[in-house]
Amino acid sequence: MRYSALSLLKNALSGHKNWQPLWRDDNPKDGYDILIIGGGGHGLATAYYLAKEFGITNVAVLEKGWIGGGNVGRNTTIIRSNYLLPGNIPFYELSMQLWEDLEQDINYNAMISQRGVLNLYHSDGQRDAFARRGNAMRLHGVDAQLLDVGEVLRLVPHLNVEDARFPILGGLFQPRGGTVRHDAVAWGYARAAGARGVSIVQNCEVTGFNISNGKVFGVETTRGPINAGRIGVAVAGSSGLLAQMAGLKLPVESHVLQAFVSEALKPVINTVVTYGAGHFYISQSDKGGLVFGGDLDGYNSYAQRGNLATVEDVCEGAISMMPALGAARILRHWGGIVDMSMDGSPIIDKTPVDGLYLNAGWCYGGFKATPASGLAFAHLLAREVSLEEAAAYRLDRFGEGALLDEKGMGAQPNLH
Ligand SMILES: Cc1cc2nc3c(=O)[nH]c(=O)nc-3n(C[C@H](O)[C@H](O)[C@H](O)COP(=O)(O)OP(=O)(O)OC[C@H]3O[C@@H](n4cnc5c(N)ncnc54)[C@H](O)[C@@H]3O)c2cc1C
């Protein structure tokens, strides 16, 4: 079914009784050419691009829960390509360009809103670092503007610039950054992949790999064994667990990250703002809720819920950046499990097990990467070589010490 103004009218006139399900809820077959483990944004996008770009449709996405139940439906919806390092900028800019065409490409409204992303700076040193980042972006053809405090206030009038403990001096602004409705991305990719013949199998947990002579030939699942010569793992916060099943140890730790939504308010913030003197980021959804988040909870965990100390910490960041936020009530908050790599950058690569491929290490920022990650992982699975824009995301860089450390934090995953 194609969405259009005409289909909307036809379905409205027939009482909305004839809309089709977005995707088939398939039963698993005995075997496929390619299996993707994980029905999050990255797994679904991979399946879609395998079908669309490489004509490979005998593919199944195996999801242990339901589509959209993982981080793809739990994140704070921010997209941007404001990176510094040459290994990262082209990849995230490719993702931004794919976002810009996504709704037409998959014929699905993902509510992509390029309302801009503003990173605040609070010291001369931070301004210099942001100027450097902005220059690196512009050298790669990415939009970036360094704003002074007056320009920042015109964008976000309620910021606390006067008697703040960390005064706001300005900001680095990427106008093309913004937000995307996160669960619509999962639904849209699932629908588009399913329409091209990919099987979407929910409630199917992978419990082990069948490996012989160093080559994988299938998986064990809660719905029986399934064979495939090529298997892509895209399970985000569960990456370490899946790798362990294949006898591998990854340079990745799993941590809880929480997100928050306030009661609906009249428009108060019309861009995405990040605080530079603490870890805090906020935007306002089209429904009026303030959507915000901050730091990790700070300990390794596979629990999709966080603790109150972090709630307090995030709210302190909010109020010190914009005191008026203290009057808003939190409506709900939740946690997701993020796969923090040792250098803060992702991995899209083959593994030492022949036929087993890995997509992991997305840290705080894998949602914005969803389209490019899917395309790059599909490219690797189909062609056995990396997409040029993702060539830096090798697994062996950790062994060689050739890290891609965007924040310069060293091998401390919780700080990236
Ligand atoms: C609170 C929070 C806020 C965030 N905010 C942002 C943001 O603003 N911008 C941004 O760019 N990024 C953000 N992120 C990060 C981003 O959401 C993730 O990096 C990204 O969604 C991970 O990829 P995914 O969508 O494929 O993951 P997921 O949606 O988690 O998909 C992985 C899937 O694998 C499944 N799975 C796990 N084990 C198995 C198994 N054994 N068998 C079968 N299936 C299995 C899981 O059930 C899950 O559905 C945020 C993350 C969180 C938690």
Image (cartoon, grey):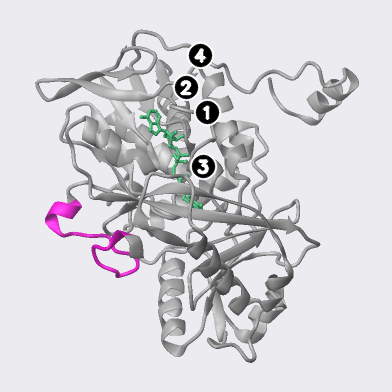
Residue shown at the point (65%, 34%) measured from the top left: 108
* Residue ID for mark 4: 26
Whole-Å distance between the Cαs marked 2 and 4? 10 Å
Label pair 3/4, CB-CB below 8 angstroms: no
**Depth check, front residue: 303 or 269:** 303
Q: Amino acid at mark 1?
A: Trp
* Residue ID for mark 2: 203
Label pair 2/1, CB-CB below 8 angstroms: yes
**Depth check, front residue: 13 or 137:** 13
Please state the horizontal and vertical placement of residue 305, each as a whole percent of the image. 49, 48
Q: Mark 3: which secondary structure? A: helix
**Depth check, front residue: 153 or 70:** 70
Q: Amino acid at mark 2?
A: Asn
Q: Which residues are magenta?
A: 397-413
Whole-Å distance between the Cαs marked 3 and 2? 17 Å
Q: Mark on residue 72?
A: 3
Q: Mark 4: which secondary structure? A: loop
